Image (cartoon, grey):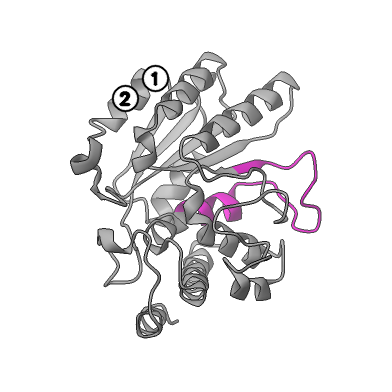
């Protein structure tokens, strides 16, 4: 898939996200929309996965540490063919496989159940350590939210990743600057994240625009520094792609109305 095709795919993923959350009447559009390019570039240009064989032991692994952004994750897996996209209409419905947070026991292609913030990155570190110990070439990718970085467990995981020299691990930060209660700086300032991750022993690549596919792909493809986990610190826009949702904290966990849905889909046409 070339860059133009991937850009078209990202628009489709955003339409899927809006349709899912509007249909359910609940969900998290802001942080789902902001991470589209990060997860799309990872799955479509980097990862070794096979939708026809989702349990392949040689597959690369992905962990959505910010589990509330599950609609974006489901959109990618559905578009790739891990399950029938007709399932999107059942998002957050009783007995649906597509719960509000990812469930590895129910959804083909999901490698870890997540939801409690801070835990997903620890799971990813464990996967990467397991692959290293087994001398496997499996690569592990994870996406965290920036508000999630207020969890101490994240920094314990980074310490372990650096200690065990997990250069098969890529940690991506969806740094959109907003969380459920306001801006990160208002709730609990995170300071200089580039300096902080560097101090914890990670190889940091900071992206001025984490919604720019060229920047994201270049970061993913940059050769690893031997013995160092890669950290992609991506400055993104909450609600990216839907003008009235962009940089609006109110859209963190609010479902669009029918009118909002229609307006959003109209923006995302073509």
Gap in Å between the C-alphas at discs 2 and 1? 6 Å
Query: Cβ–Cβ below 8 Å for labels 2 and 1?
Result: yes
Which residue appears at 49% of the width and 71% of the height?
A: 8
Q: Position of residue 269 (x, y in %)?
A: 43, 82
Question: Is residue 207 magenta-colored?
Answer: no
Q: Which residue is mark 1?
A: 200
Q: Which residue is mark 2?
A: 196
Which residue appears at 52% of the width and 71% of the height?
A: 20
Relative placement, left or right, of 33 versus 119 is: left
Residue 1 in view in this figure: no
Q: Position of residue 2 (x, y in %)?
A: 54, 62
Q: Which mark is residue 218?
A: none
Which residue is outermost to the left? 186
Q: Is residue 200 above or below residue 213?
A: above
Q: Quadrant of the C terminus?
A: bottom left
Residue 152, quarter of picture: top left
**SS majority, magenta:** loop
Looking at the rendered structure, the secondary structure element under dot 2 is: helix
Q: Position of residue 267 (x, y in %)?
A: 36, 80
Residue range (magenta) = 38-62
What crowding class fits label 2: few (fewer than 14 Cα within 10 Å), some (14-19), or many (20 or more)?
some
Residue 136, quarter of picture: top right
Which residue appears at 60% of the width and 59% of the height?
A: 99
Q: Is residue 19 above or below residue 262?
A: above
Nearest the viewer among 130 and 184 is 184
Relative placement, left or right, of 68 versus 43 is: left
């Amino acid at each position: 898939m070339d860059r133009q095709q991937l850009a078209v795919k990202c628009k489709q993923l955003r339409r899927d996200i809006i349709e899912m959350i509007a249909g359910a009447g609940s969900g998290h559009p802001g942080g789902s929309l902001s991470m589209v390019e990060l997860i799309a570039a990872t799955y479509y240009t980097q990862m070794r996965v096979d939708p026809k064989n989702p349990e392949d032991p040689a597959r690369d692994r992905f962990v959505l540490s910010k589990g509330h952004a599950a609609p974006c994750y489901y959109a990618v897996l559905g578009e790739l063919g891990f399950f029938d996209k007709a399932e999107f209409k059942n998002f957050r419905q009783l007995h649906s496989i597509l719960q509000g947070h990812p469930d590895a026991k129910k959804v083909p292609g999901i490698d870890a159940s997540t939801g409690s913030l801070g835990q997903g990155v620890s799971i990813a570190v464990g996967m990467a350590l397991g692959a290293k110990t087994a001398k496997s070439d499996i690569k592990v990718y994870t996406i965290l939210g920036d508000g999630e970085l207020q969890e101490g467990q994240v920094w314990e995981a980074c310490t372990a990743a650096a200690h065990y020299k997990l250069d098969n691990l890529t940690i991506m930060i969806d740094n959109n600057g907003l969380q459920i209660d306001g801006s990160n700086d208002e709730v609990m300032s995170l300071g200089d994240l580039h300096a902080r991750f560097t101090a914890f022993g990670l190889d940091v690549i900071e992206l001025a625009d984490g919604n720019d596919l060229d920047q994201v792909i270049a970061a993913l493809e940059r050769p690893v520094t031997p013995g160092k986990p890669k950290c992609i610190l991506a400055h993104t826009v909450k609600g990216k792609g839907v003008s009235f949702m962009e940089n609006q904290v109110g859209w963190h966990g609010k479902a669009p109305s029918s009118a909002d849905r229609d307006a959003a889909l109209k923006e995302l046409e073509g």
